[in-house]
Image (tube, rainbow, N blue to C red):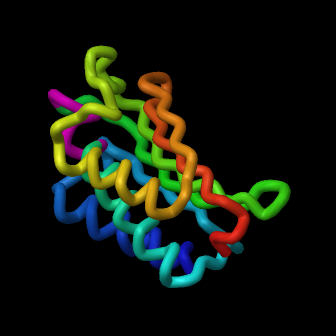
Amino acid sequence: DFDSFLKSLVSNLATSYGAPPNRIAVSTDAGGVLLPISIAVPCGLVVNELISNAFKHAFPGGRPGHVIATLRKEPEDQVVLSVSDDGVGFPDDLDIAQTTTLGLQLVGLLADQLGADVTIQRVNPTRFELRLPPHSQ
């Protein structure tokens, strides 16, 4: 049950980073999507990294905001993992494919491992979306 795992993971991350709930709202939704452990673990690692980055970088100077993590099933059994926030956005000069930060490199490696297509929206909201192939369930 990825939904309860996702809720627990995001709640623990918010607590670990000291994200004040009255300033940074966090929501999750993965209802109804079941994943095998071989897919759930790398997805959890991706969510961990992206949510951590949002808490560290998206809301500087006490800026309020919202972080959302979802997992949904689309037509033809494709599964989509998405982490988004309405923070300051992703810098234009940062090349995701050439980043030197371990965390974003890990996201790329895990996406490759999952056979996922990655889409990045840099602002309004910032969103990382991984489209997993249909055999992921």
Q: Is residue 56 magenta?
A: yes
Q: Locate residue 64, reporting x and y percent.
A: 32, 34
Q: Locate residue 58, reporting x and y percent.
A: 28, 34
Residue at 69 percent across and 70 percent down: it is 135
Query: On the image, which quarter does residue 24 sit in?
Result: top left
User: Would residue 41 be visible to someone looking at this image?
Assistant: yes
Q: Nearer the viewer, residue 129 or 69?
A: 129
In the displayed structure, 120 sits above or below 48; it is above
Q: Locate residue 20, reporting x and y percent.
A: 24, 51
User: How many marks on residues?
Assistant: 0
Residue placed farthest to the right in the image? Answer: 76
Question: Is 31 placed left or right of 127 in the picture?
Answer: right
Secondary structure mostly seen in magenta is helix
Q: Nearer the viewer, residue 51 or 67?
A: 51
Q: Nearer the viewer, residue 74 or 115?
A: 115
Residue at 28 percent across and 45 percent down: it is 104
- Give the position of the N terminus as an image quadrant: bottom right
Q: Which residues are magenta?
A: 54-61
Q: Is residue 30 magenta?
A: no
In the displayed structure, 73 sits above or below 101; it is below
Residue at 57 percent across and 82 percent down: it is 36
User: Would residue 20 be visible to someone looking at this image?
Assistant: no
In the displayed structure, 25 sits above or below 13; it is above
Q: Locate residue 28, reporting x and y percent.
A: 51, 59
Q: Nearer the viewer, residue 107 or 51?
A: 107
Question: Is 114 placed left or right of 55 in the picture?
Answer: right
- Give the position of the C terminus as an image quadrant: bottom right
Query: On the image, which quarter does residue 2 sit in?
Result: bottom right
Residue placed farthest to the top in the image? Answer: 93
Residue at 42 percent across and 75 percent down: it is 41
